[in-house]
Amino acid sequence: MASQRAMTEADAALERITQVPGIRGSLLISGSDGLVVAERLMEGIDGRAIAALAASLVQRLDRATNRAGMRAPTFVHLKGNSGSVLAAPGRSDLVLVAVASTDANLGLARMQMLDAVGRLV
């Protein structure tokens, strides 16, 4: 029953994020290995590649900030020429990820992601 509730919460979180203007998809991934737990992606987006990139980026930033004596990042924004990958690490090794186009409302996406990741178990 608890896992069904968690999946319902995950699906609701992914739905809220993908409704943000300019967001092309969202994923819930395992931070340690980059496996996709749940996804909502537009056609043509390779969820496995995005998940692997986001997991690697979050892991490396976590190690680097720990070595520097800083807290782990609560939000990561990787910007490219054709858009951005946003990641919000959460509890239980979960990372919420969004794929954004160049015209996405990144502020709203960030707020939705941080709210959603705080609700996920």
Image (cartoon, helix red, strand yellow):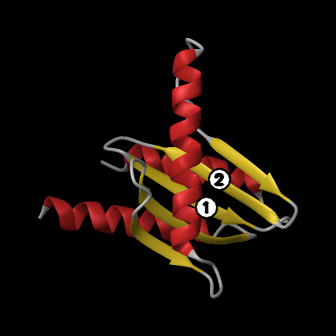
Could you say which is closer to the camera, residue 39 or residue 68?
Answer: 68
Residue 57 is tagged as none
Q: Residue furthest bottom?
A: 43
Q: Percent from the top left, x then y, of residue 33? A: 40, 54
Could you say which is closer to the camera, residue 59 or residue 103?
Answer: 59
Residue at x 54% of width, y 48% of height: 56
Residue at x 52% of width, y 28% of height: 63
**Image quadrant in which you'd find residue 17:** bottom right
Judge left or right: residue 113 versus residue 20.
Answer: left
Q: Which residue is mark 2?
A: 86
Q: Percent from the top left, x then y, of residue 61? A: 59, 34
The answer, for residue 104, to whether it is visible in the render is no
Judge left or right: residue 6 versus residue 47.
Answer: left
Judge left or right: residue 53 versus residue 14.
Answer: right
Could you say which is closer to the camera, residue 16 or residue 98?
Answer: 98
Q: Which residue is mark 1?
A: 98
Q: Percent from the top left, x then y, of residue 20? A: 67, 66
Residue at x 82% of width, y 58% of height: 80
Q: Secondary structure at mark 1?
A: strand
Q: Residue furthest top?
A: 69
Could you say which is closer to the camera, residue 48 or residue 39?
Answer: 48
Callout 2–callout 1 Cβ contact below 8 Å:
yes
Give the amino acid at mark 2: Leu
